[in-house]
Image (cartoon, coloured by chain):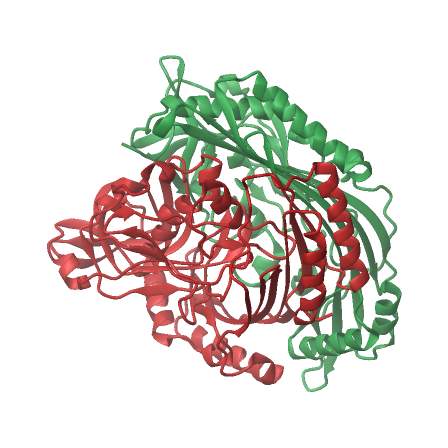
Chain colours: A red, B green
Amino acid sequence: MEIKALKGLLKETVLQLEKEVPYASAFAGSVTGRSIRVGTYEKSVQFQEPSKGVTLTAFTGSTFLEQSTNILTEESIRKSAAALLDACRKEGITFQSDLTPDPGEKIEQDSQGPMEIDPYSIPLEELVSRAQEKSGSLKTKSDKIVNMMVVYSHEHLNELYVNRNKTLFQKLNRWMTINYATLQDAGKNMPVYSGDSKLGGYELAEPDPAEFERTLQDGLRLLHASRITPGTYDCIFSPELSGMFAHEAFGHGTETDMYLKERAKGAHYLDKKVAAKAVQMFDNPAYEGIAGSFFFDHEGKLSESTQIIKDGILVSGLTDLNSAMRLKMKRTPNGRRESYSHKAYARMTNTYFQAGHDTLEEMIKDIKHGFLVDHPTNGMEDPKGWGIQLEAMYAREIKDGKLTDNYFTPIIVTGYVPDLLNSITMIGDTLKISGLGMCGKGWKEWVKVTDGGPYLRLKARLA
Amino acid sequence: MKKMIISLLEAHKEIGSWNLTVNREERDELYLIFDTVEQKRRIEEVLYHIEILVHKEKEKEGKRFTGSSSFQALPGESESALQRKIDDAVTAASLALNPFYDYDEFVPAKEKAEICDPLIRSDRARAMDEMKEKIFDIMKANPDVRLASSEIFLTCIRQERFNSKGLSHTSDKSEALLETVFLTGEGEDEVESVLTREERFIKNIDLEKVMQKYIGFARDNLTAKLPKTGKYDVIFTEEALDNFFDFYISQLNASMKYNKMSVFSPGETIADEFSGDRLTLSFNPHIPGGYRSMDYDHYGTLARKTEVIENGIVKGFSADRKYATYLNMPCTGSPGNTEVRTGSRSFKDLETEGTYVLSRFSTFTPNALTGAFSGEIRNGYVVKNGKRVPVKGGSVTGMMKEAMSRVFFSSEEVLRRSYKGPEYIKVLNVDIAGE
């Protein structure tokens, strides 16, 4: 059964469950897609592992219980509902609780994300041959490239959310292109990549070609670059690194399920100064065309922008249904699941620092000795301790107000989040959002996110 | 449905070989916030994973080629929908031709991998309750530390595998996942320690021992200081062990060799010089409870133990059937659990004055291509005047090839997920960045 066709059955099931429990809802989702990978020595065409199933949710008055299945027959869904009700009865049901999930306003909505050219309308042969030509032509750009892989990938999500007031359906299409090169010289490897992912279709197949050229030139310089002398320096973070900084620093730290568990220091800092006055930070799933955008979250909250930091003050958390209800906080569109078979948590979407007014040249010109840090590769949050780890491909030395050709690799940025945020003195004038990221809750529960920012000038500990 | 899939695969004239895996998964999840149940979930899934190989001969080149493609079928799919998926996979495979290879001929397994916890198989509700109660009991004995949250996932998967070379094999495997967060201290100075373990058997988590250890980490964090910047001898243990050898595991995989991404060849040393113990590393698919224990790999190859590094010298590559054929090297099957030979020194001998002992990092995954490693320190201590002084924050950085030239492995051994080897790994002269 197709996801959209489950509307009536799921509505009926939810209403049936609510005859015995204070609140019930249903989420159904499917993902399909293809991935074409052409490297110098191997190629493959794979069909994305389809995820298709339904989760029924019931609230007993104190506890949420869920039952998930990927057998989408009427009989199987009714059986799941019966098993869920049975589990609720065993757990104990109360209508006397002061905890009541908000079902929201009455609304029925069908939405579809942008897509100009449906990738399924392009013959597979054309996709493979385009990737093959591109892999071949990019490989000729340097004799140090030992393997040049081009990846085209597209996925199509159908999601349905139903509760007593809402029937919401969304169709989202994502395209991703990655150019991944392995450089090698004198027994040393250096991997470099560029690319992008956005909501849309085949029209997005060719992201800015200059980006790969820039990445490749950086990679070639890094093949024989040395390690940096550990220390605290005047730094400029590239927009990509600023994005990862936003995500790790105050994205995870404002997911309010962490407040509920008393695992986020941010809970003590709501309405308090956490960053330099010029810093503005947002999480916005309504950002048009961006890979982490959607029309409603997996708990039925319609998309809108949330300002997290306003003029350096922490002003809002990112909530899911459970934490908003228990903490009596405003619901924001951040209740997200990895798939129908995973729990919903408070999660980020598109998280970014807003642009300021400074140019890169202005930011560099009075730095006596410092570094431009670029190409983030990994990051990790620490909402309780406000420690941070950002890994980047390189730091380029700045001396007497000028960028030098001295590169250091790899780089790890560590520090105390408020120290870093309060040390921001200049903010670049252009916001750039990177779409290739995925985000885990700790080390699991992966969801699509993006992050971004402008160039940021600040003090940071590099190693 | 599996009979229908097999008959459609067998009837397709363009399919050279095929492989069908049926996973029936049942998972129970329990989420606690402090001592209250936040949520309980039950998941039941059936998934059919199919891979097909298409063999083509190009007359002009006089060579044979193989294309592969895989897809999943969901329960209840009609015969016509399955036929469409198979046709699409054949088209996809025909467009992605690589050098010829095929699955292995079926050889019966003499023994079965021990990868299913009997209690998870028979009574997950009881297993879950027992774990929950044990957690609560341990917390009662540690009143200065609070349990912020716990997630327990217990999974049982029955896996049936069939292929066109005669493989017909059923196995059960289990997964026990625990994530528990401990808090201690007060107000803004409160600190946490996060315990995450995932094992095939509940007993391998060793709840009592591991919880006491992480409760201790939480207490240490109350007084922990930033380490001092400099070069120090560092003992890596606990979570750092999970991915410690990833660089060598990746580099000594034949797929990396074929794609020119490996910088090693058989007979070469894994480091430029040696002033400590020499690494001996094997892949062992027969360790009871090992996360990568198996009877057969993806290509239908009977799983077996393979040594890839012996006394610091590359002995060979781990090569599955596909890459063994491409590179004309012996087929070892896909890598099993990582097994590292222990050393002769005890932890007590290694824990000398000035040494940092680091247990937890925000992440610690050496780069598979460069061997660079780095990690923000979440828990550890430095031995100062014979005492253990807790540290956290700052980072440790280095390169694996350099680290392996001055390393000592403990005589104590540990099994964690898919790693069996020294419980403590001491690397001399490592960069630490702190205050």
Left or right of residue B315: residue A292:
left
Residue occupying the point 30% across, 33% down? B434
Residue occupying the point 35% across, 27% down? B189
Comparing A103 with A69, the one in front is A103
Left or right of residue A238: residue B334:
right
Comparing A75 with B157, the one in front is A75
Image quadrant of residue B172? top right
- Across and down, in percent, residue B3 comes to 89, 65
Left or right of residue B109: residue B179:
left
Comparing B360 with B163, the one in front is B360
Residue occupying the point 13% across, 61% down? A362
- Across and down, in percent, residue A71 comes to 76, 60
Image quadrant of residue A423? top left
Is residue B22 visible in the rendered image? The answer is no
Give the tally of numbered discs.
0
In this rendering, the answer to whether A379 lies above or below A46 is: above
Q: Residue furthest top?
A: B386
User: On the rendered image, what quadrant is the C terminus of chain B found in?
Assistant: top left
User: On the rendered image, what quadrant is the N terminus of chain B found in?
Assistant: bottom right
Residue occupying the point 43% across, 75% down? A138
In this rendering, the answer to whether B333 lies above or below B340 is: below
- Across and down, in percent, residue A262 comes to 45, 34
- Across and down, in percent, residue A402 comes to 14, 59
Q: Residue furthest front?
A: A96
Comparing B103 with A159, the one in front is A159
Is residue A182 visible in the rendered image? The answer is yes
